[in-house]
Image (tube, helix red, strand yellow):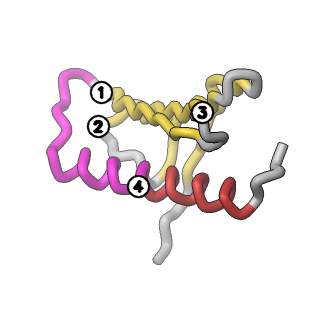
Amino acid sequence: MNVGYVKHKVDALDAENFVYHYSIIEGTVLPENLEKISNEYKLVPRDDGGCIIKSINKYYTEGDEQLTKEFLNVGKEKSAAFTKAVEAYLLANPDYN
């Protein structure tokens, strides 16, 4: 499967508060009716030593374009896959700093 290319822009990286915020600003995965897709991931510590991964995804459309539910559902699935990949990495590398 050829995805093409994706250009990301890091908007914020806050190591102290475990926040990573980036935007997809260009690429074949970005439809023409979207200016950008902004993604924020935050790791929130739990009392048991684990964490909760919180994510916010914002879609910036061109003009007054509307996004379909199908498109948003695909985006939600991709975000969940990314979150699961981060979770798997952290579980496999508990001493990662």
Q: Which residue is mark 2?
A: 33
Contact flag, marks 2 and 1 (Cβ < 8 Å): yes
Amino acid on which the number 1 mark rests in the picture? Glu
Label 1: few (<14), some (14–19) or many (≥20) C-alpha neighbours in 10 Å = few
Of tags 1 and 3, the one toward the viewer is 3
Amino acid on which the number 3 mark rests in the picture? Asp
> Circle 1 — which element?
loop
Report, in whole angstroms, how far the alpha carbon at label 2 lies from the one at label 1: 5 Å
Amino acid on which the number 2 mark rests in the picture? Asn
Q: How many marks?
A: 4
In the image, residue 49 lies at what x, y percent?
66, 40
Q: In the rendered view, would you say 4 is above or below 30?
A: below
In the rendered structure, which segment of residues is drawn in magenta?
A: 63-80
Q: Which residue is mark 3?
A: 47
In the image, residue 44 lies at what x, y percent?
57, 31
Of tags 2 and 3, the one toward the viewer is 3
Query: Could you tell me which residue is drawn at 34 percent across and 32 percent down?
Result: 59
Nearest to the observer: residue 85 or residue 92: 92
Query: Could you tell me which residue is drawn at 65 percent across and 31 percent down?
Result: 10
Is 64 left or right of 86, judged from the image as shown?
left
Label 4: few (<14), some (14–19) or many (≥20) C-alpha neighbours in 10 Å = few
Number of the label disc, if any, that sits on residue 62: 1
Contact flag, marks 4 and 2 (Cβ < 8 Å): no
Is 76 left or right of 39, judged from the image as shown?
left
In the image, residue 39 lies at what x, y percent?
49, 34
Of tags 1 and 4, the one toward the viewer is 4
Q: Of the residues under marks 1 and 3, which one precedes in the sequence?
A: 3
Q: Of the residues under marks 2 and 3, which one precedes in the sequence?
A: 2
Query: Could you tell me which residue is drawn at 59 percent across and 44 percent down?
Result: 7
Q: Which residue is mark 4?
A: 78
Is 37 left or right of 18, judged from the image as shown?
left
